[in-house]
Image (cartoon, rainbow, N blue to C red):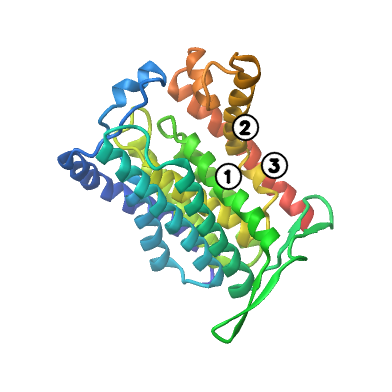
Amino acid sequence: MRFPTYQIFLTAVLALVVIAALAPFWIRLLKSRGIGQNVRVDGPQGHLLKEGTPTMGGVMILTTVIVTFLLMGRLDKLTVIVMIAMVGCGLLGLLDDVSKVLRERSLGLAARYKLLLLGAISVTVGLLAVNYSGLSTDVAIPLTKLSLPMGKFAWHLKVAGSAVVVPWIYLLFLYILVAGTANTVNLTDGLDGLAAGTVTIVMLAYAGIAFRQGHLDLALFAAAIGGTCIGFLWYNSYPADIFMGDTGAIGLGGAVAAMAVVTKTELLLVVIGGIYVIEGLSVIIQILVFRLTKKRAFKMAPIHHHFEMLGWSETKVMIRFWIITGVLAGAGFALYFISAK
């Protein structure tokens, strides 16, 4: 196409329109089936009013992303990896959502099963990145010309007559990256519109990075995710008519991590997706401080609930976290350009 930036913009707009049109039908279907959110009784008391709000909006989100991208772009080796990560993590989230609905409680799959399945997804992503797409196992250190050689220790196997490299240190690193991102995006999905808004901003940054690298189809995939999340916000903003559930949050988290892998910006994800690092660290700090001192570092974790407990409205927390995400994503985007010179 002569105007690739226009194609990226058009992809985002198309995704927005598609999900905005589908959402009312999906919401009515979920309500008719009695598929609603189960709220934690130990969470903020204001959230008890959300009990029964339709969930599993993630099914609609991931479907819209895939359909929109296939209409506007083409599958290449890099987008295949991101799609596999997104769908794999989304299916894991769907199992979690279904478990919650069937048990009528806010707890889904046991953590060990989630981590095991995330491990399988991470290994698949890593093996495809190295053996299918030919990506390097070196992890670039931002603002330097240095990189961490994580493929130095690897197994070389013969599978069906083909040579397969298994860089186990790199795979372990990817497990931490994918599992950490998927779980922290899921943690962020605790307020109406928070996860969808932050993922939109992060994906805009990755669309820019992919475009700068000459990977138009990868940029289109990121744009499809960003546009879908914007359209979803029409129904997910406070007070939400529908939640994305673990299907959406874990699926989108997997896509964010995979974008970092295929653009070789693994360590920059700590900055671009810094809001997820903050959310995850707040939970870790809360647990550690409580175990050591029997006191709480925050009124409630993840940290967005801490500000709710301080009296901030959901909307104020959401918008201010969006602003923080924008600053961090912009900083990461700038660091990429500086490092790429």
Visible in this render: residue 319? yes
Q: Earlier in the sequence, mark 3 or mark 2?
A: 2
**Element carrying mark 3:** helix
Q: Position of residue 250 (x, y in %)?
A: 46, 46
Q: Report the residue marked by disc 2.
A: 281
In the image, what residue type sits under mark 2? Leu
Give the residue displayed 54% in from the left and 54% down from the top: 119
Residue 181, compared with residue 224, is above or below; it is above
Mark 2, Cα crowd under 10 Å, few <14 / some 14-19 / many 20+, is some
Residue 100 locus on image (x, y percent):
31, 38
Q: Is residue 229 above or below residue 133?
A: above
Residue 211: which quarter of the image?
bottom right
Query: Do tag 3 and tag 2 residues touch (Cβ < 8 Å)?
Result: no
Q: Check residue 199 in the rendering and tell me which mark sits there, or answer none.
A: none
Q: Nearer the viewer, mark 3 or mark 2?
A: 2
Question: Which is nearer the eye, 88 or 28?
Answer: 88
- Residue at image position (68%, 55%) is 265
Q: Position of residue 231 (x, y in %)?
A: 38, 45
Image quadrant of residue 331? top right
Tag 2's secondary structure? helix
Q: CA distance from mark 1 to mark 2?
A: 11 Å
- Left or right of 31, for residue 83: right
Q: Which residue is mark 1?
A: 180
Residue situated furthest bottom in the rendering: 161
Residue, disc 3: 331
Q: Nearer the viewer, residue 50 or 19?
A: 50
Mark 1 vs 3, N-terminal side: 1
**Sequence-wise first label, 1 or 2:** 1
Q: Secondary structure at mark 1?
A: helix
